[in-house]
Amino acid sequence: MGEPLETGRELRNRAIREILRQMEGAEVSSIEFEGPEIAIYVKNPKFILEGEEKVRELAKILKKRVVVRTDPRVRKAKEATLQFLLSLIPEDVNVDPRDIQFDEVLGEVRVLADKPGKLLGRGAALRSQVLAETGWRLEVYRKPPMASKVLDSILRHMTVTSERRRRALMEIGDRIYRDVVVGTRHVRIIGLGSFSEVGRSAILVDTGESKVLLDSGMSPSGTGLDAMPHFWIPEFRVEELDAVIISHAHIDHIASLPLLYKYGYRGPVFITPPTRDIMLLMLADFVELSKREGGEPLYTMKEISQMMTRVITVNYDTVVDVAPDVKLTFVNAGHILGSAMVHLHIGQGLYNILYSADFKYYRLKADRARRLLPPAVEEFHRVEALILEGTYGAKEPQPREKAEEDLVNLANKIVANKGKLLLPVMAVGRGQDMMYVLYNLMKEKKIPEIPVYVDGMIYEVTALYTEYPELLAKPVRDLMMYQGENPFVAPNFVFVNDEDTRQEAINSEGPAIVISTSGMMTGGPVIEYFANFAENENNVLAFVSYQAPGTLARRLAEGEKEVEVPVDGTLKTLKVNMEVTSVEGFTGHATRSELLLFLRHLRPKPRTIILNHGEPSALLSLGKSIKESWQKMGFDAPPEIMMPENAESIRLFPRSQKVKVALDYL
């Protein structure tokens, strides 16, 4: 059953002894367990500068995240610190005072600058100077070339709720470092959603000691309870939930999360920084969309705000405790900005689960397509069980390079016919993909520089992409960070932010491309464009992403030529004369061949593979292929393949208990 777990009291006592021993001279004023971190507050700011090696050694001994902050009582007032900072900024570095934010919980002052390297100076001398003189830790970030209202609102929220956040972190710390009650008795997963279907992703991991929820989504095509995860089954109780882990910010992975807070959950949400930002945008829009459609929102901004107070951001490749017997590591999934595979280390060396969530995989050396994100990670320390998505398990979309060729042909066709090319996209991921590809195609003169109208939430999400250029694929990262070129603000890109611009896009005489939400045509401005473009045979509707069963997009992709859509509050019947086609090579999901390629290069190999996030036929086809080619993929023995349904429980550890007992008596 692995090594015995250290009790919460034992851990705290050991931590305090080690901290006081290692940090002599730091003038430690308090030691707090804030979320997954052990926060040490000191009255001597110089120790933070001089004692970095001691802190690293301490974290290694305790096997915990350790942060050192100045005691709030030794920090200078914010106004005095602001003036001190402004006096040190070089003349050729642009910093607006409004771009300087203080986080009292973390003791940080954050500065957005157009030239962060120049501001910090060689060896980050400014950071040391500010800490020594003011007690605040300076963090400098590159100012994104596109302004984001969402990012501003998050920074304001963090400032206004700093005391509430600190109290929440202390409560979460008490939960994570509580005394062990029964220890890790088993490892079970219960599918609450996304098993034998696409949508409403939610997986409960139960260890006997802890319960952790992986994702909390809603179905894009369902309504009412059919859209919700199976929160009503006996195994799931909000009051027993220790943590929620979110893989990425698509609606089918996040939309039911605020509901947990509405019904009493007060625990943490672990998430990557970009996913936090995008999630806030998506959830706020989800609430507004419900209101616009005349329905009663499932939750309000109150629950979203409550949730944001308990969000804990975790960078890639960082190990954190999320429960007494569960450690989490996020790694890049390559699906959208901030998307992560979730690695869970359960017990003291007992069992490891890798949850792929939605991911994209390709081999860098063999790939010749334009990619916005790097591929998913393939190397891990241990993996006993893999929960693998199978969205394209039965289907091999066209290669990415061929998809780009098809897009060139479609664009040139509407140029010749003076028509419109309508691309329904999800605001997160595919919208930015399309902009990046079109930017390059026009730059290379493969298509004329015609207007590209971008509508929906795509602008806000794209602004967030420019906030994290270091997470993008190397060619894009280099373009933005070192060549000063932003592929998302090309001269012919027109961001639609009012009805006049939308009407310009609809009524313009010349050829144009429209990129609009939503990708499955379940709502959003794409419906207005479609209603105006559908009956003109010179126009083209091209789907560049997955369409869930039952959605308008799926029905059109399958050939329906007469559909009803809402226009000005009433249903209107449209004859679909425009060309309808699918260009599926742009998918952000691993294709069938990429899924098998990932398994081939995955290290180490899992003993158990649980297939989810796919229609039954796709999962059956994928499972059959794995069983037939396990040797070619480098497995030592055939992996156990499982395809559970929603509400079904699977015990991953211990396995074959009855056989073990029988053998003991032989």
Image (cartoon, rainbow, N blue to C red):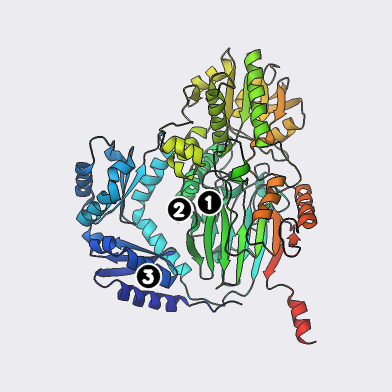
Give percent across and percent down for residue 317. 50, 57
The amino acid type, in three-letter code, at marker 2 is Gln
Give percent across and percent down for residue 105. 34, 57
- Decide which of tag 1 and tag 2 comes sooner along the chain: 1
Q: Circle 2 — which element?
A: helix
Q: CA distance from mark 1 to mark 3?
A: 37 Å
Residue 281 vertical placement versus 650 (above, below): above
Q: How packed is label 2: few (under 14 Cα within 10 Å), some, or many (20 or more)? A: some
Kindly give the residue lying farthest to the bottom in the view shown: 665
Answer with the quarter of the image where residue 584 lies: top right
- Decide which of tag 1 and tag 3 comes sooner along the chain: 3
Considering the image in quadrants, where does the C terminus appear? bottom right
Q: Circle 1 — which element?
A: helix
Question: Which residue does the numbered mark 1 point to in the structure image?
Answer: 258
Question: Which residue does the numbered mark 2 point to in the structure image?
Answer: 306
The amino acid type, in three-letter code, at marker 1 is Pro
Question: Which residue does the numbered mark 3 point to in the structure image?
Answer: 58
